[in-house]
Image: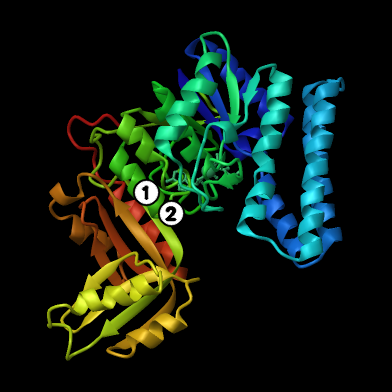
Amino acid sequence: MIVMKFGGSSVADAACMRQVGALVRDRLDQAPLVVLSAMGKTTNALFDMARAAEVGDLPAALETLAIVRGAHRQAADSLCEGAMPEALDEALTEHFGELELRLRGVALLRELSPRSLDAIAAFGERLSTLVFAAWFGVERVDARQVLLTDATFGEAAPQAERIRLRAAEVIGPLLGAGRAVVTQGYIGATADGLTTTLGRGGSDYSAALFGAALGASEVQIWTDVEGVLTCDPRVVPEAQPIAELSFAEAAELAAFGAKVLHPATIQPAVEADIPVTVRHTLRPEGAFTTITGRVATGRPVTALATRGGLTVLTVSSTRMLHQPGFLAKLFEVFARHRVSVDLIATAEVSVSLTVEEDVPLEPLLADLRAFATVAVVRDRALVAVVGERLKATPGLAGKLFGALGDLNVEMISMGANEINLSLVVAASDAPRALGQLHRVLMAEPLLAGSGV
Ligand code: ADP
Ligand code: ASP
Ligand code: MG
């Protein structure tokens, strides 16, 4: 079997869903499990509704609900060419009725727990799959029966072994050459049946989890780009498709801001040794990326990524730095405040670290300042240069810094796995840094034996 996952833009309206239908129909002999995201920006709209209800603005919440309902009804009507089956009509009414009740509850209590938010956010995938499965005439499995997670609402951790058992039990018997099965991405449930979500962008993760659980021969991520490109095309329009990517490179790119894949996607696929492909829904004949455990051949630098919203802390202590245990003491403070550190660079008397800009900084700083001075610089972005062959390419550092020209680099860190060189720059410099790096590093000739 294969897994075919379609992202929000691939199921945004009836025309998109028809294209998805055509792609699935072409691959029916491969026994596809179709994993769908919410239509277009539905998940954002659901978050907006929930937040409006939380502050007591029920009219605003219901207005957004009406827009979302309109979009789903319109898609269903258009797909069914005006003859919507009664069962679908009723199911839509029922879903929107339940959603409205939940919003009214939130507005009444002016309280939105992570648990309620997940129940509301899950409607996006529940609805898109409802419409698609009814129109396409295929079995729809509620992912919450299979994708069991812990109770960390908003970012639930999947329980692989239980998922495997449930998938074999619930989905396995439905799969077969000549037919498709549809289920939701992003959503799951706790053992006692409470709805959870895997975090924004989590449908990719669902696809990989289902693929691993069912022993898929391939997990296909269908989206709005021709595979993983050498950079986000919205930042660097000259970005080019990458034919082959290693799991490690893909994981680094995802973690460092390449939105094309959810950061955790790759892990279940790596463990099960299942290739993941990234393909363009509207250009199925175009270029695509295959991600496997092998080190692909290609350029010294495979791709660039960027992630903004960082704060740099430089912790200095002339007295302490050389003493054994200083770093342990430093990180103990971060651990105690539950602040995770991204990048680290050490110098003679100081350590620079990056943290996400939205972490509560003041209590952490107060504790750090008990034994060190701390300088805080906000509005920074990370620029990551990723490639399995980075370390084996002499002269790369010279080219890299040459490419940056007069741009100021504030911190540099080579990832311990040596496939990721990260630079910290002012957020406003990041697009220019990426453009300049891309121009120079991607002009490198392909290495011998290249598959690209
Ligand atoms: P989907 O809704 O299908 O999950 P996403 O919006 O999550 O799609 O991911 C696709 C988007 O990722 C692209 O439109 C592109 O702007 C962005 N992106 C960021 N970095 C890259 C990259 N290196 N290669 C391709 N796309 C990228
Ligand atoms: N619909 C969810 C989101 O927008 C999950 C996904 O699309 O991957 O975050
Ligand atoms: Mg996505």
Element marked by disc 2? loop
Quarter of the image for residue 389 reads top left
Quadrant where the C terminus is found in the figure: top left
Q: What residue is shown with label 1?
A: 253
Viewer-nearest residue: 87 or 22: 87
Vertical comparison of 335 with 439: above or below: below
**Is residue 138 left or right of 269 when viewed as pictured?**
right
In what quadrant of the picture does the N terminus appear? top left
Report the number of numbered marks: 2
Q: Is residue 395 above or below residue 202?
A: below
Neighbours of disc 2 within 10 Å: few (<14), some (14-19), many (20+): many
Identified at 60% across, 37% down, the residue is 37
Give the answer, above or below, for where 7 lies relative to 20. below
Residue at image location 65% in from the left, 43% down from the top: 122
Q: Nearer the viewer, residue 3 or 147?
A: 147
**What residue is at 75 percent from the left and 55 percent from the top?**
49
Is ligand 1 within 8 Å of the beta carbon of the residue shown at mark 1?
Answer: yes
